[in-house]
Structures are given as C-alpha cells and as structure tokens.
Image (cartoon, rainbow, N blue to C red):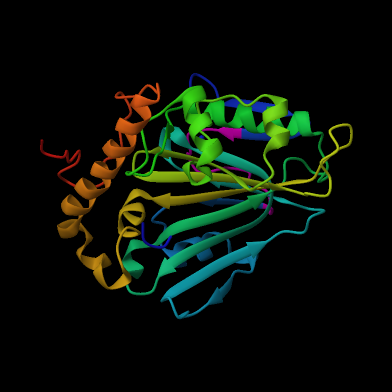
Amino acid sequence: MVALISFLRNAVIIFLTLGMLFGCQQEKGHKNMTSNEITIALGTPTQELIDKHPSKGYSRIDKQPAGLNFYKINWNTNDRGTVHINHGNHSLTIPYATSVTGTEDTDRPELGIQDFLITAGLNSSGEISHDDALKTLSSLISNLLDVGWKPLLWFDDPRLSGAEAFKYYQKNPSYGIPPDYRLCLDEWMALRRSIRWRLFAGDATLSIRFQRDSQRLDIEQPGSYLISFNLSTTEKLAKNHFEQSEQNDWKALWPDMIKSLKRQRYAKEAILEEKGFTINHDYQDPIIHPDDPIEVED
C-alpha cells in the first residue's frame, strides 16, 4: 500500500490504573475545562480550533513540501495536558498528554483537520511497572471494544482473530496486535519493537502505538513508556492507497483497488487455512466508499 473510546452507558465508564485515567464519554462540550485541557474532533476547521483554545500557543507550519499545515501544542512533562476526542458514542479522554498535532491539507482546507496525533504517558511520573503498563493498555483496548470500536485490518491482510491472529502477527509485525487478544506478561516483555493496535468506529480510524525504553526491561524494575494515538478519517485511509496525483480521484479508482487488495487477502487466507488457521468470516471492513462493501466476483 502506498504511503502512509467510555461511551455514556447510564454513566461515564472509566478505568483507573496507577493514576492513569482513560475515559470514554459522549461529548457535550467540556464545561469547566482547565487551562491544560483541549477538545478535538475530526473535521474541525482549523480556525475554530484556534479560536476555542487561543491560549494554547499553536505553532503553524505553513505550506510544507507535502502541502500540509501543522497545528501543534506541547505540554510540560511536569504539567501535562488532557485531550478530549469528540467522536459521539465512541469519544475518548486521554490524560497525561505531552503533545497534540492536527494536520490540515492545504489543498482541501474546507475539510478541516483530518488527522490528529496525540502523545501521552501512562501516568504523571513517567515510570510504571511493566505489569501495570500491560494492564493499563489492555484495559484501554477492552474499553474501546466495549463501546463499539472494532479491529481494523488492512484490506489485503487475512481475517484472523484471537490467538491465531497474534500467532500470525509474530511472523508479520506489520499486521499489528489483534485488539481481541489479551497478552500475558511473558508475551508483553518479549515484544521489543514498537507495538501497534488498529481500530475503527464509523468514519474514524484509531491507531494506538506504544514505545518503551529498551534499556529499562528488567521485569523487577519500573519501565518508561510513551503511548501515541493517531486519529484519522476512513477517507484518508482509502486515499493512502493511491499516489498523491491520484488521490482526488480515489472514489473512481477505489473499486478496482479494493478488489485487487481482497484478492491478495483471499490468497493469503487459502494458504493459512491449509495450515489449520480459521478465517474469521464475520470480520467487516469499514464502509468507506458509497458502493462498499465491494466484493470480488467469482
């Protein structure tokens, strides 16, 4: 492929692990927000975001070579921020944020910000035991699934789930960790590379990625973790399958592209079935194009 949260169910569902609170809530405009809080949503006009948070000191980088504007805020590590992501029933609150960056396409400013990157710690201190880090991130993923976020696979990836999906990931790291698989501590500590979970809800995708200090892997000692959230639109997911020069015509090109990708998926699945893997035929790709789901003809 080319280039590259809890819902109000009678009350706000939250989880708390060693001082870390990730809340999913239905956004109604955060009253009584502190100076370190910010609310973001996909499609927000850039000027509206700046007007709502004039004290945040956005730094704007105009007209990069890729035709993008960046709107960024950084918080002091000793006085971190809170980012509220407004996405209806799938809304998410991220504490201990160190930065948030919104990206605008200079050729389509009417679309507003179509991509946000939020970086955060797992607590206020920056140190956390490896077991508690695993429990925190596992609770986050479980809560996301509970409020309707769904696992996201690339269109040419095989439709696997649970332990089989994790087994496939171990040999194919780009597959990402399946959100429906709970890692044990041994598996967690064996993961040396940067780890990513991918989900989608409605017209939004969410990629959650963590990195840890590779010099602090003693299981008896605390580690240091950084987590990032990349919130983007499903339309951008589709466009990323094409060269820059073709992206304005992505809707016309999508049917042929998705058929080609699905043929690759089915070929991989046939090989895996011969090896005893079970294909999850209940998996549903996100609806992106007006003709979705587009299937491959026999």
Given residues 163 and 94, the one toward you in this image is 163
Residue 61, x across and y down, in percent = 54, 77
Give the residue at x 89% y 31%: 220
Given residues 165 and 114, the one toward you in this image is 165
Residue 161's place in the image compared with 117, above or below, is above
Residue 156, x across and y down, in percent = 33, 44
Residue 6, x across and y down, in percent = 53, 29
Give the residue at x 40% y 21%: 276
Toward which corner of the image does residue 149 lie, by quadrant?
A: top left
Given residues 56 and 253, the one toward you in this image is 253
Query: Mainly helix, strand or loop, the magenta region?
Result: loop
Give the residue at x 42% y 57%: 44
Residue 170 seen anywhere in this rendered image of the structure: yes
Residue extending furthest toward the top = 10
Residue 146 seen anywhere in this rendered image of the structure: no
Give the residue at x 51% y 37%: 169
Residue 23's place in the image compared with 254, above or below, is above
Q: In the rendered structure, does residue 251 fall within the stretch colored magenta?
A: no
Residue 77's place in the image compared with 32, above or below, is below
The magenta segment: 23-36
Number of marks: 0
Residue 49, x across and y down, in percent = 49, 61
Is 297 positioned to the left or the right of 275 in the image? left
Residue extending furthest toward the right = 221
Residue extending furthest toward the left = 298
